[in-house]
Amino acid sequence: MNDEMTFWRRLLWQDWPHRLTVLLCGIFLLQFTYWIAKEDNFWLPETILIVQLTLLATAVFEHIPKLHWLLRGAVQLVTIVTINVLVLEHYKVIRSMPLKSFASSKLFLNLYELTPYLWFALGAWVLYLTAIWLVEVKWRIYALLIVSVLALCIRDSFSTVYLWPQVAMMVCCGLFLLILCHFQKLRRKDPAAWSRFADYPASIAVPVISLISLTVFLGALMPEIGPVVTDPYTAWRQLRGEPMNFTTGKGVQVTAIASEYDSSSGYSRSDASLGGGFQFDYTPVMTVDTTHRGYWRGETRSLYTGKGWDESDSEKRGASTAVRPDNPVTADPRQPASKPKTVEVTQTVTMLTEQHYPVLFGAYAVSRVTDVNGAKTGFDAMQWSAPQSELKFNERNPYPKTYTIVSQVPVIDEDALLKLPAEPASTGMEEFLQLPGNLPDRVRKLAADITKDAVSPYEKAKKLEQYLQKTYPYTNKPDLSKGHSRDFVDRFLFEIKEGYCDYYSSAMAVMARSLGLPTRWVKGYASGTSAMNEDMLGGLVPDEGLIDPDAAGVYTVRNADAHSWVEIYFAGFGWIPFEPTAGFVLPRTVPEPELAIDTSTVPADLTADAEAAGIGIQAQHVVWTGGSVVLLALLAYMAWKFQALELIQERVRRRRALQLKQKIIVECERLLRIFRRNGYVREEHETLREAVRRWTKQSKWMTSELDTVLLMFEKAKYGKSDVTEDDLRQTTQIVEKLRAQM
């Protein structure tokens, strides 16, 4: 019995430093395969699986003791070929290939069919054996560790690929390899001491492993702390206004200006990897003097990758045409022959920043450009892409300080759109129905469930829009720790369940495509803030009682107004915009009601009376001229007698006080909308006081500010005493402070 236990003990623990070295080298090399798997379209899935299985097989056979290196190599080679055959048959890359055929004349033909996959497997095998040899010397371990970690760190910093888990694993393996190298040195210098370690490896292995594991575990539990100093690369990208690639702790890749939650809002340069959070940046970008409020459209994307949006092949190769002053641009070839009704909107854009953009911004759809910098020159830098409805601008040229665009904004005739029959998409719309093959089925199922009662395509689109607006709360700082799915839309709909415009618009575009609706993703700017409606924020429409939220005016557009939405194609109408983001309302133009006069109800003698009335006009003119002088003198006397001037001044003072009260109420209503976007919703049955009490229990940090706003609101809404300019100023400052802090 003792002899049997001794046999198994020696079998398991014999030459344990070598076995542990083999295991650590395998784990180290495995991190490179994880890196390659995260790169888009770099290696095929079957190639990655073959390489990983090769590393596993090599590690297993290296653990077999007292096996001649020639025999071990032959067995490993046969195993590698077998792995290639089984994996490629599983992925249907090759036809069925019995292993016995390798012993026939088809040996070389079979090996040829396994290429180039076989070369990757053999390369991994050689690298594994080379790594085992490299780590026998301490300085080679340092060199291997530094080069590998540096490569991964550079790739992580300069791309959207998240590699910090792989870096941490490499460092951990390197530390253990250095310890093993030290033990090997001890084995050569002091065989007696080593003999005890070799017989009882647990006496040293347990403390070492426990110490390193505890260190790594405590490090993982430590809270994340942002960098104190901005690294040069990030500072340079921020200075240029270009996006920074970063990722969350869960490996969710996002694109922003700096780092997570410290990034600023603004027009995105790259949309290949969406998500994350940001801070609102209220730096002005431009003013738009327009005849109708609109969304200022920039670019479109049609290729959804599961991580974000990119240009499709047709968009990259799409031909562009030159733009000429006042000449209409070419129409979108997909637009219907019979053009729908439109409203002409003229916009004069004045840039307030030195930043360059790849497009000129304007309401959909641009019809013509009338001037650049106040002149009919400078059009050479512009190119019109009709399929994308984009006014592209060559960034090598100075970006215009001001330009004027005329757009033909489509009229939304919902009655006619609701009557459209459900028809398959026409030829040429395939790219707007594209979806990744690995899109989770629950996304398609949710879209089908939402629209199961809808009859027409337009009704389906409206149901998707309304569902997203009402179901998911808006926030610029979504809780990314809830997200685990590899698909951006799936992660939003079922895991994170909150977000901002990119989340909503991408979700609607993907779900609409799953229903067969041709859809494209659009980015640009929301309307901005007009001088008339100061409470309009980021595309939000004012409450009832304010005059015409879509009126003409000068709108100030800021970085915080950067926005994304969707456009869906309907036969006979072309591209129609939709706004799925909670709290936002798309500017719309609707058909004007036709006013008809029924002449049959006019009395027959009305014409005669009108003619009779006109006979005395000429005679009465003389009387009116003389009487007007007397009337003016009488009015002046009456005004002096009854102190009309003092009465007018009193009415002006009362009206001014009333306006101040209305402005305070408008500010409070704006605060309610800001709170609603951040998850603080006032229930229908609640008074404002009840809602404030509930919110302050939830977030005590804003108790003082909310109590002050509540006092001002009740004073303006119900109080008999007048409010002052200071009251309005204090309310406005508190609202701005709360908006900035949320």
Image (spheres, rainbow, N blue to C red):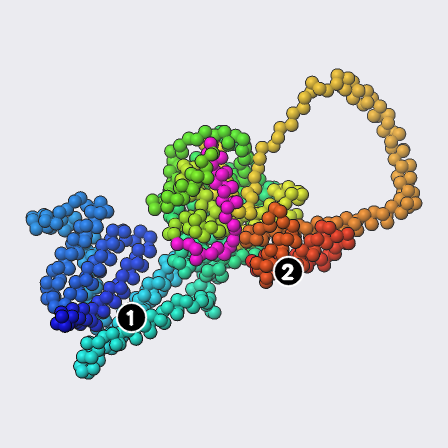
Q: Which mark is residue 164?
A: none
Question: Is residue 280 toward the left or the right of residue 154 in the image?
Answer: right
Is label 2 in contact with label 1 (beta carbons under 8 Å)?
no
Q: Quadrant of the C terminus?
A: bottom right
Amino acid identity at mark 1: Gly
- Point out the residue furthest to the top here: 604
Asked which quadrant contains residue 408, the reply is: top right
- The residue identified by callout 1 is 174
* Image location (x, y in percent) of residue 597: 67, 24
Q: Quadrant of the N terminus?
A: bottom left
Magenta span includes 164: no
Q: Looking at the picture, tell me which residue is in the foreground, 578 or 181.
A: 181
Query: Predominant secondary structure in magenta?
Result: helix
Q: Secondary structure at mark 2?
A: helix
On screen, residue 734 above or below 312 = below
On screen, residue 307 above or below 592 = below
Region in magenta: 455-484
* Image location (x, y in percent) of residue 132: 21, 68
Q: Tell me if residue 639 can be seen.
A: yes
* Image location (x, y in percent) of residue 394: 45, 50
Question: Is residue 198 toward the left or the right of residue 383 in the image?
Answer: left
- The residue identified by callout 2 is 705
Asked which quadrant contains residue 608, the reply is: top right
Q: Residue at x 24, y 57 (%)?
A: 52
Q: Looking at the picture, tell me which residue is in the foreground, 79 or 309.
A: 79
